[in-house]
Amino acid sequence: MADPAPRRRIVIVQGHPDGDPARLCRALADAYAEGAATAGHAVERIDLAGLDFPLLRRQVDFEHGEAPAALLPAQQAILAADHLVLLFPLWLGTMPALVKAFLEQVFRPGSAFAPAAGGRGFPRRLLAGKSARVVVTMGMPAFLYRWWFGAQGVRCLERSILGFVGFAPVRRTLLGSVGSASPAARQGWCERMRRLGASAS
């Protein structure tokens, strides 16, 4: 008899800035969480629309400050997790500003990466060993964003932010034409999220 899949600690970050509970990103996050919990994984959820935190404005604050008190639980949850799921709508070709502001606050020197000694060489990736999935909804067809626009905004997130601090592998799910999607299509996307949650991938 095969051994059961190992239980993983999963953090789901719902990044739609609109607090409307009817947003598709929330349904997708719910479905992923349901699939993960049913499979026995530990799940913690973070909804950015419900958090109030300042923007980073100075390099010195980023390098020597701490995450705002409102984000310390989220930061600690991500540091303790095995797998991160980040969901957001595509705005102007990339993540909403709220998502970028959140990542700037929680992925700080000393917690997410360690600067190289003397400022030379590559920083040490302190979040190595963790995996991630990026789930992006968009109004345009997903193939158009992928092939015509090169998915540049998402690729930057994957490589220059998540990869920079150590997440690997970083997988993506792009869901397009969401504004005109039928109820059956939305249900199919949620079922897909449940399967991904069950496998913690």
Image (cartoon, rainbow, N blue to C red):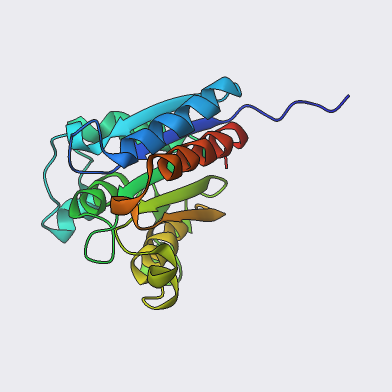
Residue most extreme to the right: 1
Name the residue: 19% across, 37% down: 49
**131 and 200: which is toward the camera:** 200
Q: Nearer the viewer, residue 154 or 114?
A: 154
Q: Residue furthest bottom?
A: 148
Q: Quadrant of residue 164?
A: bottom left
> Is there any visible trace of residue 17 in the rendered image?
yes
Q: Position of residue 196 (x, y in %)?
A: 56, 39
Q: Position of residue 113 (x, y in %)?
A: 41, 53
Tell whether 161 sits left or right of 4. Answer: left
Note whether 106 is above or below 20 in the view shown. below
Residue located at (27% from left, 32% from top): 72
Residue for point 38% across, 39% down: 183
Identify the image quadrant of the N terminus: top right
- Quadrant of the rendering where the C terminus is positioned: top right
Residue 111 seen in the figure: no
Task: Give coordinates of residue 55: x percent, y percent.
Answer: 12, 50
Q: How many marks?
A: 0
Residue 76 lies in quadrant: top left
Residue drawn at x 22%, y 50% is 64
Q: Quadrant of residue 20?
A: top left
With respect to residue 5, does 144 lie above or below? below
140 and 56: which one is in front?
140
- Residue sitting nearer the eye, 146 or 165: 146
With 21 as the anchor, is 40 left or right in this view?
A: right
